[in-house]
Image: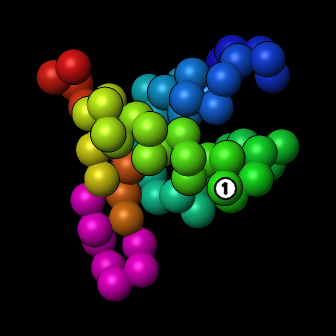
Amino acid sequence: MRTRHATAEERLVDILQSTGPCTLDEVLTYLPDLSWGEVFLAVDRMSRRERVLLRQVSYSTSQIALNREV
């Protein structure tokens, strides 16, 4: 894993590479020093650039996965 000085996006990539797809709540447990908003913004930026894929698994839960095609 990268150091604490890595960006939220870099840390999210590390998590998804090591764990595979996970929910936002699961990501938050791996990044306790970041707020929900910081993680959400990182996911949003990465989703817009198609670095991650989002899949709705229930009414209020989405799964985040790395886009291996980028």
Residue in the picture at 76% in, 53% down: 35
Residue 6: quarter of image? top right
The residue range painted magenta reads: 55-61
Residue 26 in sight from this viewpoint = yes
Q: Is residue 28 above or below residue 18?
A: below
Quarter holding the N terminus is top right
Q: Is residue 11 left or right of residue 17?
A: right
What is the tally of numbered marks visible in this picture? Answer: 1
Q: Is residue 65 above or below residue 11?
A: below
Residue in the picture at 38% in, 49% down: 64
Q: Which residue is mark 1?
A: 37
> Neighbour class for label 1 at 10 Å: few (<14), some, many (≥20)?
few
Quarter holding the C terminus is top left
Percent position of residue 61, x then y:
41, 72
Q: Nearer the viewer, residue 28 or 39?
A: 39
Work out which residue is located at the far left of the displayed protein and give it: 69
> What secondary structure is found at the residue carrying circle 1?
helix
Percent position of residue 55, x then y:
26, 59
Q: Nearer the viewer, residue 20 or 52?
A: 52
Percent position of residue 4, x then y:
81, 22
Q: Nearer the viewer, residue 14 or 35?
A: 35
Percent position of residue 33, x then y:
83, 43
Q: Nearer the viewer, residue 42 or 26?
A: 42
Q: Is residue 62 above or below residue 34?
A: below
Q: Is residue 60 left or right of residue 26?
A: left
Residue 2: quarter of image? top right
Q: Main secondary structure of the magenta part?
A: strand
Circle 1: residue type: Gly
